[in-house]
Amino acid sequence: MNRRIRFESWSTVDRFEAGGHDGTAFSDGALVVDSPRGIREYDDPHRDGAAEGYEQAVWTSPEVSPGFVFTELVSSWNARTPEGTWIEVALCVTTTHGVTTPWYVMGRWAETDHDIAPTSVPGQSDELTEVNVDRLTLSEAGAGSTYRIRVTLLRRVGSTATPAVSFLGCVASDVRAGEFAASPERNGAAGIVIDVPQYSQRLHVGEYPQWANGGESWCSPTSTSMVLAHWGLGPTQADYAWVDTAAPDRFVPYAARHTFDHAYRAPGNWSFNAAYAARFGATAFVTRLRSLAEAELFINAGIPLVVGVAFTHDQLEGAGYETNGHLAVVVGFDEHGDVVCNDPASHHLPSNDEVRATFDREQFERAWMRSSGGITYVIRPPGVPLPQPPAEPNW
C-alpha cells in the first residue's frame, strides 16, 4: 500500500495570518469573529422550526501542496462555541488535471446540540469527488494536487459572542488500494503499557436509543472518553447531570450525545470526536499513521492512540467478534511487541474489567491499515510534546 501521508495544521498567529481573513481575526490564541460579513439564513435540516439568521465571518487557508497526488482528505478542528454560535468547516481541491472542485462541507458543528444539530452533510458528490461523512474522497481520475481548508464562524444575529477556533488540521493521503506488507520496523516500545482507564461500551447497550441505539455503536465516544480520562480531562458531574444516575460511567452517554452526527445518525464521526475532546482542554486531531512502528513513537512519548479498525473473525484472533468499522485505544505493546488495546467492545462479559486485550501485531496492523488506512485520533494536553515527526510529517 502506498503510504504517502501529510498532515498540515493551523494553530498560531503566523499560520493563520498566512491565510485569508474575511471578517475574522486572531485574538487570544484563536480565530474569532472581528467584523461580520453579512447574514446567513440556516434552516436546520434536523430540527423543526423556521430558519434563523446568523452573522458570519470566514477564514480560508492558503493553497496546500502535500507534495504527492492524494485521494483522500480528513479535516479536524478544536473550537469553543458559546451559546448561539457554531462553525462550518469545508474543503476545496484542485485536481492533477487543474480542475477546482466546489467547496465541500465537512461539518457543521457546535459544542452542544442546543443551538444546531451538529452534522455532516450528505449528498455532496460528482463524478470525481464524494464526501463520505468525515472523508473527502477523490477518484483516481480526479486525484488531488492541492487543497484549501475554510472555516466559517457564525453567531446568531444580535449576539456579540463568537466561536473561537484554536486549531485546524487536515491530513492528505493516497489511499489507493495496493498490497500491504506488515512493517518489520520497531521503535523500542515493547513492554510499555500506558495505564489508561478501561470503559466498556457494552455496559450501555440499550441506553439512550436516540443516539444510535445505545452502547452497541458507541465505540468511538467510549474510546475518546478513555483517553480523556487518562489525561484527567472530560465533562464534570454537572455537565452530565441529565444522565440517569443508575447508568454506569455517565460521561460515556454524555460523550455519545456530544459526538453524535445527526446526518450519519451515529457518534462515530472522526472529526466530531476530536472536536469533542478539545472542549476539555486537549489538543486533538485526526491523522493517519503508516505503521505500528509509528504508533510506538507515541507510546514512548506517553500518548495513547484511538485507532480505526475493521476485521472478520479470522482476521484478528482473540477479538471474538467481527466489525465493519470500530475504534479502540492502543495503550502499548507487550514484551513480544504485540499490541495491547483497551477495546470497548471486548467480546467478554460487559465489564470494564474485560476491556484490556492483546492482539497479534501483524494481524492488528493489517486490519488497521487495510480498513481505515491507519486512521488515528491523537488526543493530549497541549503541554505534552508530540514525538519527532518523520520527514513527510503526518503529525
Image (tube, rainbow, N blue to C red):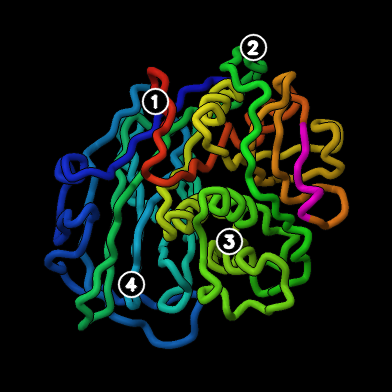
In the rendered view, tell whether residue 162 sits above or below residue 286: below
> Which callout, 3 or 4, points at the residue further toward the start of the chain?
4
- Circle nearer the N terminus (1, 3): 3
Q: Does 138 sit above or below residue 51?
A: above
Image coordinates for residue 214, horizontal then vertical, percent: 72, 67
Q: Earlier in the sequence, mark 4 or mark 1?
A: 4
Where, by quadrant of the figure, is residue 251 drawn? bottom right
**Quick one: which residue is furthest to the top in this view?**
184
Report the Cα–Cα distance between label 3 and label 4. 24 Å
Which residue type does callout 1 highlight?
A: Pro
Q: Amino acid at mark 3?
A: Tyr
**Residue position for label 1:** 393
Q: Is residue 54 magenta?
A: no
Where residue 82 is drawn, which disc sits there? 4
| Residue ID for mark 2 | 184
**Secondary element type, mark 4:** loop
Alpha-carbon neighbours of circle 4 within 10 Å: few (<14), some, or many (≥20)?
Answer: some
Disc assigned to residue 340: none
Residue type (three-letter) at the residue carrying disc 4: Pro
Q: Quadrant of the N terminus?
A: top right
Magenta-colored span: 352-358
| Circle 3 Cα neighbour tier, 10 Å, few/some/many (<14 / 14–19 / ≥20) | some
